[in-house]
Image (cartoon, rainbow, N blue to C red):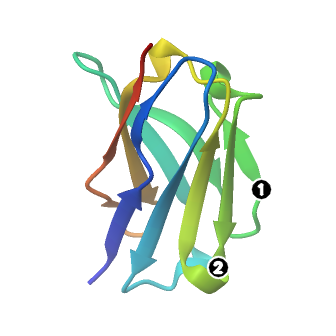
Amino acid sequence: QVQLVESGGGLVQPGGSLRLSCAASGTIFSITNMEWYRQAPGKEREWVASITRGAYTTYADPVKGRFTISRDNAKNTVYLQMNSLKAEDTAVYYCHQVRGDYWGQGTQVTVSS
């Protein structure tokens, strides 16, 4: 059974940084593409970033240049480094395994002074 567990969310001031982690279990992590999504209150869930099994990365325009997605196949973990955070980055962030369409439970990120 595939499980994705996110961690690292919290409250941060504008301009600050956070690193989210998503630990996967029950899956052959190294052969699957991974993604991060987010959902702000009252809005649709939106794609944030993707990383292929070969570590090729793509980003949504609102986060390009501020967020970095990476993976550690030895630890079955994907990361989202978020820098220069803005109030509009406030959302629940979800990890998504493309192979099999699995989702984590989400972790709250709040950017506020």
| 4 versus 60 height, above or below | below
Q: List the single residue furthest toward the left.
A: 42
* Quarter in which the N terminus is drawn: bottom left
**Residue 55 at what x, y percent from top left?**
75, 63
Q: Quadrant of the C terminus?
A: top left
Q: Give whichever of 99, 113 is nearer the camera.
A: 113
Q: Quadrant of residue 40?
A: top left
Say what secondary structure mark 2 lies in.
Answer: helix
Q: Residue at x 67, y 32 (%)?
A: 83
Give the quarter of the image for residue 67: top right
Q: How busy is the neighbourhood of tag 1: few (under 14 within 10 Å), some, or many (20 plus)?
A: few
Residue bearing the label numbered 2: 73
Q: How far apart, in angstroms, are the residues tagged by discs 2 and 1? A: 14 Å
**Residue drawn 29% across and 18% down?**
43
Q: Looking at the image, can residue 78 be seen?
A: yes
Q: Which residue is mark 1?
A: 56
